[in-house]
Image (cartoon, helix red, strand yellow):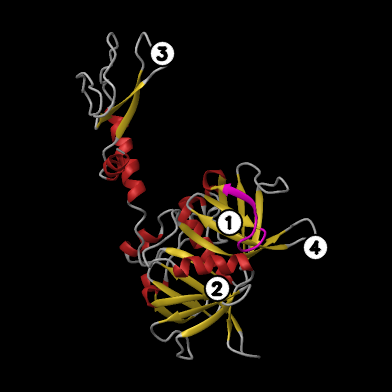
Amino acid sequence: EREREREERESGRFCFFLSLVPQNRQHSPATMMVESLSPGDTEDIQPAQGQPPRAKGSRLHRTPIPSSVLQASEAAAQTRHHPRVPTDSTLVCEGLLQKLRGFGRNRTRFFRLTGAEFAFYTTEGGALISSVPRSSIVQVSDVDACTLEVTTSEPFGASGQSVMQLRATCTGAKYRWMSWLRSSSRSVPETTVFRQGLLVKVVVFGVGFNRRRWFELTEKAFSYYEHEGGKLMAACSLDNIEAVLPNGETEFKLIAKFPFTVTGSRVVVCRSETPEANTMWLEGFTAALGSRVRTSNFAPLPKTLRSTDDTFGVLVRRENYSSNQIGSEGNRFIDSKDL
């Protein structure tokens, strides 16, 4: 019966186990099984094979099940047995790792694992150095507390080697990388990840209080941890985010509707290593939040302050210009190639 139940769950059907309590014997229930109920079924239920007969005087009928319940159950079964299918660009894991090449030759690079490839860059948001298909990863070994070794079936890196030793920031970060690098090339996080990385959490009321934290932006929340693979410190659900604004070339400011940080603040200022990295974070927020993100410091003047007699016009390609204004909230951006 257990095997039958499992097979029917996997096929999208479902079983209900009911207890039949005779009117004259409240302490002796008989287990009944009802298969694949559908809306409108009302015929009498007979005991399942191997179960004791129904006691005289007791009645049990199939009761109609709402279509909404059936549809919800089928949807849940499909979700359970059909995990999210990755695309080539689906982000799996990213962050800084040190490439170990020998004394005086070690370099810290920004690594990125997606649904299709394993790649590393000069810096976060920097130039691509090398990449290999994710399917070419043939072995991932544990070297020491913070070091792992990746073996690929084709050359990986400027040196043309197929074996690379990488040092993570901590043991937790190493195991995070090893887990995903060892997983199937079709494995992706259950929750969509937009960005991951180290940022400086800027404290505006004093000098020396800034802290480097590990931040993650997913389809559910913007969270930060004590360090990569460390303890969760705070999380702001996307519904709680009021706006995300640039705060200079290398910083952005997140404003929440309600306090969410450890100190009880609803505003967080984060600093990236480079302007390119800051742009990547703003692009990640744009993908996650849409119109609640402003990616430029430019803001139009209020209508009452705009001049009406000192004007000029430009001729642009309509299709490109129109698509670039979606979600711009009044800002107008014209690319030089569209003029």
* Distance from Cα at disc 4 to Cα at disc 3: 73 Å
- Identified by mark 1, the residue type is Leu
Q: Nearer the viewer, residue 255 or 112?
A: 112
- Mark 2 lies on residue: 124
Q: Where is residue 330 shown, x and y percent of the image?
A: 47, 53
* Distance from Cα at disc 4 to Cα at disc 1: 22 Å
- Identified by mark 4, the residue type is Val
Rendered residue at 51%/83% (across/down): 164
Considering the image in quadrants, where does the N terminus appear?
top left
| Pair 4/1: label in front | 4
Q: Which mark is residue 26?
A: 3
Rendered residue at 36%/64% (across/down): 186
- Residue 310 in view here: no
Q: Residues within 10 Å of mark 3 (few under 14, many from 20)?
A: few
| Pair 4/3: label in front | 3
- Identified by mark 2, the residue type is Glu
* Distance from Cα at disc 1 to Cα at disc 3: 66 Å
- Mark 4 lies on residue: 207
| Marked residue nearer the N-terminal end (3 or 2) | 3
